[in-house]
Amino acid sequence: MIPSVLPAPAPGWTVEADVVVIGSGIAGLVAALRCRPHGRVLLVTKALLDAGSTRWAQGGIAAALAPDDTPEEHLADTLVAGVGLCDEDAVRALVTEGPDAVRGLIELGATFDSAEDGGIALTREGGHHRRRIAHAGGDATGAEISRALRAELKDSGVEVIEHALVLDLLKDAAGRAAGITLHVMGEGQPGGVGAVRARAVVLATGGLGQVFSATTNPEVSTGDGVALALRAGAEVTDLEFVQFHPTVLWLGDGATGQQPLISEAVRGEGAHLVDHAGERFMVGRHELAELAPRDVVTRGITNRMRETGASCMLLDGRHFGAAMWENRFPTILAACRHHGIDPVTEPIPVVPAAHYASGGVRTDLHGRTSVPGLYACGEVACTGVHGANRLASNSLLEGLVFATRIAAALHEDLSRTLPATHEPPPANPPEGDGPASGMPVGLLGAGARGEIQRIMSSCAGVLRGADGLERAARRLAGLGGGDAEPGVEAWEVANLHTVASAIVAAARRRQETRGSHWREDFPERADGAWRGHLVTRLAGDVLVTTYEPLEGKRS
């Protein structure tokens, strides 16, 4: 069973705001800053302000900033990577508003690496036909963007609550979002379970990579926003499209948790993928070889590993020399050396690992979800930009552009919406808001986290098939209805279980190979039957997934 409400103590305190933003990556920070004209803004984040995925972003942020580049070319590359499922209007908004949005980051104090002519240094990554990736600190782009936005936040008037795990959405009598319940830890803040009453709720909770054993995502990426949205009755879309980054540092068979990422920019600067015999196996598989879209490279690596029986492939950048590694990729160099690999003198062992969710909470072009008053941006959202496979370095740009669009939409939305009633939140969910069965839904214990991750990695990872997905669905269903005590660990595991179940449901339904969804039993793309979106909702305690075809729509 999937809980429609997380079992939790009644809220012991209440805070009022006009807008509450959940998450402190690029999407959450920009949303909070841009929403300041709308009244009291409260930003809540699960750990520290800089603990999310943004600070780990190495490669950069994509935008048509070069004189020989155009938004139309950026759009074309994005549509190709999305394999027929992008919303062209959303992509057009991204690529046309992107350059000015990046310049806005610079005005806020973000410092990007400079080219010899004094302009912004740009590099290439997989799927891009132009150099359009702006980077900072060599390979520390996310950390620099996060630093600049946090500095701007400091004296902005935005209030911040750290160490706050969001639990569920509050609604008013009309079904509109009216705030959140959350659990707060730490000194100098209200503690325990409380509530924030707000006129608008913005989800910017990031990804769900911790649903797999090996991922590039930090520990906080447990799919909390997608799970909350499902429990609140919102639609989520295209969850089967989980992107596996092709080049993650191999730490040995059975490695789990957050894995060191080897940025696509390393290949963009000319590093080669080779097998253990030294053969460049991506040459001939795609016109861009190592710079093919990520799904293509991931499949190429996985296939070569299966063909040769090797546990990993190799990324060879020895020809860069020490100076380039130290200046252009200092973070990656340090991580490799920490694990006993020196890229200056030896190839880097790499494997694919879970990296990014192209699907998420369904939104329109202004971040509105199917629940009035609930908005989403960043990785938690499905704006339509990524389709079946995200183009490299479009993620930071999407968070930036669509967080700004939400702030603009709220100017109109809040002016025509009555303020939320500020009555104390109920101690228990109203009648009818619980599971359809009427039976109490329990929580899973800490041990279930590892089991969920093992199920997903073995049965719903890079390579999928009907038998494995059926086994995953059965094993996940068998985990439901535990008796763990309410608490942070149990709530996180409940979110992982919900998201894992939704991913498997969508992956079982889509009987084709497209983008980052690779079915070995349906190895071909099937536009006639499967050019469309899978939309998942929670009906009572049951996930319901339906198919929406795209006949006649642009992509």
Image (spheres, helix red, strand yellow):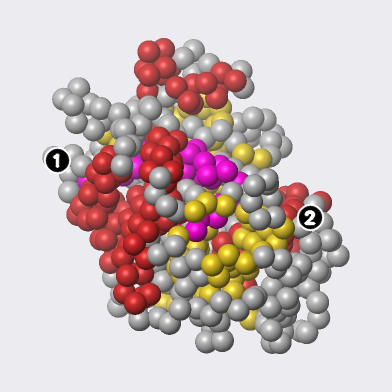
- Badge 1 is on which residue? 68
Q: Which amino acid does label 1 sit on?
A: Asp
Look at the picture and state if 510 lies above or below 28: below
Q: Is mark 1 on a helix, strand or loop?
A: loop
Q: Point out residue 7 in the picture as x, y percentages from the top left corner.
A: 75, 69
Residue 276 x, y percent position in the rendering: 55, 25
Which residue is painted at 62% across and 60% down in the image?
A: 166
| Magenta range | 42-64
Residue depicted at x 17% and y 48%? 70
Q: How many residues crowd around disc 1 within 10 Å: few (fewer than 14), some, or many (20 or more)?
A: few
Q: Give amino acid for label 2.
A: Ala
**Mark sitting on residue 448:** 2
* Image: 193 above or below 115: below
Query: Going by the picture, which residue comes out furthest to the right?
Result: 483
Q: Is residue 283 above or below residue 444?
A: above
Q: Is residue 283 magenta?
A: no
